[in-house]
């Protein structure tokens, strides 16, 4: 007689359950990829100064528009989350109780991120729009 097939102990049969650890991982990867592409574009546009100073000035002029000023808020949001979450990952990896309290630390990261963005956004918008 053949043994009965094993039933999955994972609810819904999937590894991803939408908990704090998964969202931390997803957001860390998304912000990391976004920052990688920002740095790539930043290096390329800065390199323009050696090729054509006029083209460099045009690109920098495009960056000084209100739309790009608002987009900088997204850039800062990505940098701040990636930095705080990176510190959380270091604590999870190297602190004895890090794995037990990783959920709490994720909410601390969100709180610090929110506090930083609340402090940064109004001041940045004042500079962008000249208020």
Image (spheres, rainbow, N blue to C red):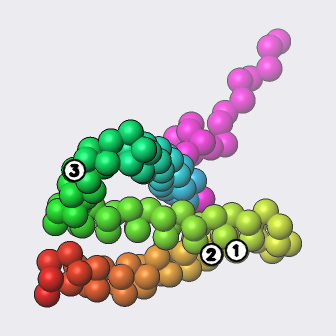
Q: What span is colored magenta in the figure?
A: 1-21
The local crowd at label 3, few if under 14, some if 14 to 19, many if 20 or more residues have their Cα within 10 Å, is few
| Alpha-carbon span between mark 1 and mark 2 | 6 Å
Give the residue drawn at x 82%, y 12%: 1
Label 1 near label 3: C-beta < 8 Å? no
Please report whichever mark, 3 or 1, sits nearer to the chain's N-terminal start.
3
Q: In the rendered view, does 130 fall on the left or right side of 87?
A: left
Where residue 39 appears, as percent x and y from the top left, is 48, 50
Please give the residue where the numbered disc 2 appears in the rendered image. 105
Camera-near label (2 vs 3) is: 3
Query: Residue sitting at 26 percent across and 53 percent down?
Result: 57
Q: Confirm whether the magenta stretch covers residue 20.
A: yes
Q: Nearer the viewer, mark 3 or mark 1?
A: 3
Who's the residue at 44% across and 62% down the image? 78
The residue beneath circle 1 is 101
The image quadrant where one finds the C terminus is: bottom left
Name above or below for residue 4 compared with residue 78: above
Q: x and y percent of residue 41 in the render?
A: 41, 45
Q: How many marks?
A: 3
Q: Is residue 116 left or right of residue 95?
A: left
Q: Which mark is residue 58?
A: 3
């Amino acid at each position: 007689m053949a043994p009965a097939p094993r039933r999955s102990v994972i609810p819904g049969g999937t590894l991803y359950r939408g908990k704090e650890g998964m969202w931390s991982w997803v957001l860390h990867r998304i912000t990391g990829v976004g920052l990688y592409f920002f740095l790539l574009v930043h290096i390329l546009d800065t390199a323009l100064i050696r090729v054509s100073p006029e083209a460099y000035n045009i690109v920098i002029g495009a960056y000084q528009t209100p739309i790009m000023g608002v987009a900088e808020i997204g850039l800062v949001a990505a940098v701040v989350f990636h930095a705080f979450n990176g510190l959380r990952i270091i604590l999870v990896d190297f602190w004895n109780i890090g794995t037990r309290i990783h959920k709490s630390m994720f909410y601390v990261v969100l709180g610090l991120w929110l506090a930083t963005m609340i402090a940064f956004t109004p001041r940045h918008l004042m500079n962008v729009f000249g208020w």
